[in-house]
Image (tube, helix red, strand yellow):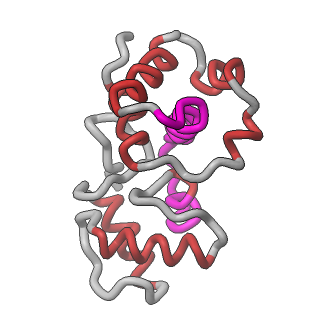
Amino acid sequence: MAIIQYAAQPCGIIQLGERGELVYLVASSLHSLGLLRQIEDIYTPAVNDALNSFRLANKLPTADYCDPVTLRLLCGVDVGGDELMLLARACEVLLPDANELERFDFCREIVESGEDIGDRIRQLTDIGRLLDAPMPSAETVKSALLAYMLRSE
């Protein structure tokens, strides 16, 4: 099975409008649970609504995208991406009033530091504080993904 990739980076995060085999797998799993009428290969608002119903049934927070934790729970597929979700969550907790550019700059600075993303975030804040925070917005997740994709190696 091919893994969906956000701009050629396997990340376990699926945004609205993306398509591929992993989106089809998510939709098929939701359909088999009776949460989705029609199986689709595009991540549409209908697929996201069904996924949010699955999250609520499993006492998980809702979001406007598919995250790695939900993907593992629903489909048993692990393609990583947890560090990017942690980065997005840290960005929203540490910079609650930041605009999109400030969020991207924060994420880029963390990614470009050359350290492990989790280690760098632990230096900035208590991880427990992040775990209690709500799911990051789709825009902040996109900022973290973009910073990760544009990192210089």
Q: Is residue 84 rendered to the left or right of residue 26?
A: right
Name the residue at 38% across, 26% down: 104
In the rendered image, residue 102, in percent from the top left (x then y), is placed at 40, 24
Q: Nearer the viewer, residue 48 or 73?
A: 48
In the rendered image, residue 9, in percent from the top left (x then y), is placed at 35, 35
Region in magenta: 70-97
In the rendered image, residue 8, in percent from the top left (x then y), is placed at 28, 35
Q: Nearer the viewer, residue 127 or 58?
A: 127
Which secondary structure dominates the residues rendered in magenta?
Answer: helix
The quarter of the rendered structure image containing the C terminus is top left
Using the image, determine if residue 90 lies above or below residue 65: above
Residue, far front: 97
Q: Is residue 8 magenta?
A: no
Q: Is residue 74 rendered to the left or right of residue 36?
A: right
Using the image, determine if residue 26 lies above or below residue 140: below
Q: Is residue 83 magenta?
A: yes
The quarter of the rendered structure image containing the N terminus is bottom left
